[in-house]
C-alpha cells in the first residue's frame, strides 16, 4: 500500500466494553498489575476504569456494557488532524464513517479487516 499522507500518531487508546462482572474483573486484574487509575471528568457516572500513561497521551479503558455501550473492543488512534487522516483513508480505498464531534474531539470510525473496530480522532 502506498502512503498518501503520513499521519502523526499522538497517542493510542484501547477500549473494552464488557458485562459488569467481566469489566470489573479486567479492571481488578490491571490494578493487580500495579496500574493506577485516573479520574476523567467526562467519564463521571459511567461504571468502569481508565488506566493512563504517565503523560496521559494514551490509556486503557474498561467499561460496563449498557444502553449505548454494547460489548466490544475498539482501538483508538489519537492523531494530529482527523479530517486529513479521513481524506487519506478514503484515497486509500478505506471507508471511514463520520465525523462525529464529542468530548472535544473530532472522531471517525472504521472497521478493520477481521472485524476490529477502530476510531481515529483529534482535538477540535
Image (cartoon, rainbow, N blue to C red):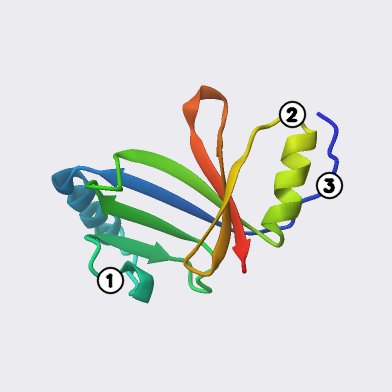
Q: CA distance from mark 2 to mark 3?
A: 13 Å
* Residue under pointer 2: 93
Reply above or below: 35 against 64: below
Per the image, the residue denoted by label 3 is 5
Question: Alpha-carbon distance for marks 2 and 1?
Answer: 38 Å
Q: Is residue 39 left or right of residue 109?
A: left
**Crowd band around label 2 with a 10 angstrom C-alpha radius: few (<14), some (14–19), many (20+):** few
Residue situated furthest left in the rendering? 21
Q: Quadrant of residue 110?
A: top right
Q: Position of residue 67 (x, y in %)?
A: 23, 47
Residue 120 circle label: none
Closer to us: 79 or 58: 79
Of labels 2 and 3, earlier in sequence is: 3
Image point (84%, 38%), residue name:
3
The location of residue 48, given as percent across then percent down, is 25, 59
Q: Name the residue rendered at 35%, 76% in the picture.
A: 41
The residue lying at 58 percent from left, 46 percent from top is 98
- Which quarter of the figure is the C terminus placed in? bottom right
Which x, y percent locates residue 51?
37, 63
Q: Which residue is mark 1?
A: 44
Q: Is residue 67 left or right of residue 91?
A: left
Of marks 2 and 1, which one's residue comes earlier in the chain?
1
Amino acid at each position: 500500500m502506498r502512503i498518501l499522507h503520513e499521519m502523526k500518531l499522538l497517542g493510542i487508546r484501547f477500549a473494552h466494553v464488557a458485562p459488569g462482572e467481566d469489566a470489573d474483573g479486567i479492571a481488578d486484574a490491571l490494578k493487580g498489575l500495579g496500574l493506577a487509575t485516573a479520574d476523567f471528568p467526562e467519564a463521571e457516572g459511567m461504571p468502569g476504569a481508565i488506566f493512563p500513561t504517565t503523560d496521559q497521551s494514551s490509556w486503557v479503558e474498561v467499561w460496563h456494557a449498557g444502553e449505548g455501550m454494547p460489548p466490544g473492543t475498539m482501538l483508538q488512534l489519537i492523531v494530529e488532524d482527523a479530517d486529513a487522516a479521513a481524506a487519506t483513508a478514503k484515497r486509500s480505498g478505506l471507508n471511514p464513517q463520520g465525523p462525529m464531534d464529542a468530548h472535544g474531539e473530532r472522531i471517525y470510525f472504521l472497521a478493520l479487516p477481521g472485524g476490529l473496530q477502530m476510531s481515529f480522532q483529534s482535538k477540535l
